[in-house]
Image: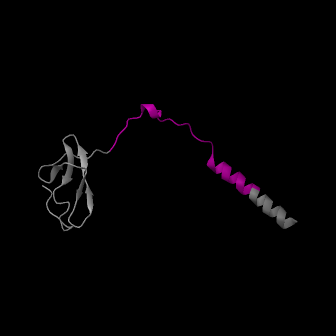
Amino acid sequence: MKKVLRRKTFVVMFSAFALAACGVPEEDTRAPLEERPVSAQAYPDCNPATDCIVDSPHVTCGDGVIMDAWSTPDGWCINRDVCGRRGGYIVC
């Protein structure tokens, strides 16, 4: 009986300490979601020295691997030598 009582006392004490350690949640001082600025990672524009504009969002390399292009205001852009190590060719 005493062992069971000690175990229950331990559980009650542990629960009380755990709740006390958590404390009262602080008030959220951040701006509401509607007022927070929205940011997204934008892909860079096509650099004519390293990239070229293609007609589709995908380019198939010589070994069958499909590489993805990114969308820009000018069209789909991809790195020129994206297929260079895959048995392919320079895209443009």
Q: Nearer the viewer, residue 18 or 78?
A: 78
Tell me the quarter of the picture where residue 3 sits: bottom right
Tell me the quarter of the picture where residue 65 sits: bottom left
Q: Note whether 10 is above or below 32 in the view shown.
A: below
Question: Is residue 23 found inside the magenta-colored segment of the image?
Answer: yes
Residue that protrudes farthest toward the top in the picture: 35
Q: Note whether 80 is above or below 87 in the view shown.
A: above
Q: How is the image coloured?
A: one colour
Q: Is residue 26 left or right of residue 53?
A: right
- Picture coordinates of residue 48, whole percent (x, y): 12, 49
Q: For the magenta stretch, what is the residue range?
A: 12-40
Q: Residue at x 62, y 42 (%)?
A: 24
- Picture coordinates of residue 56, whole percent (x, y): 23, 49
| Figure quadrant of the N terminus | bottom right
Tell me the quarter of the picture where residue 34 sits: top left
Tally of marks: 0
Q: Residue at x 15, y 49 (%)?
A: 47
Q: Note whether 75 is above or below 29 in the view shown.
A: below
| Figure quadrant of the C terminus | bottom left
- Picture coordinates of residue 90, whole percent (x, y): 13, 60
- Picture coordinates of residue 55, whole percent (x, y): 19, 48
Q: Residue at x 34, y 42 (%)?
A: 40
Q: Nearer the viewer, residue 46 or 54?
A: 54
Q: Note whether 2 is above or below 28 in the view shown.
A: below
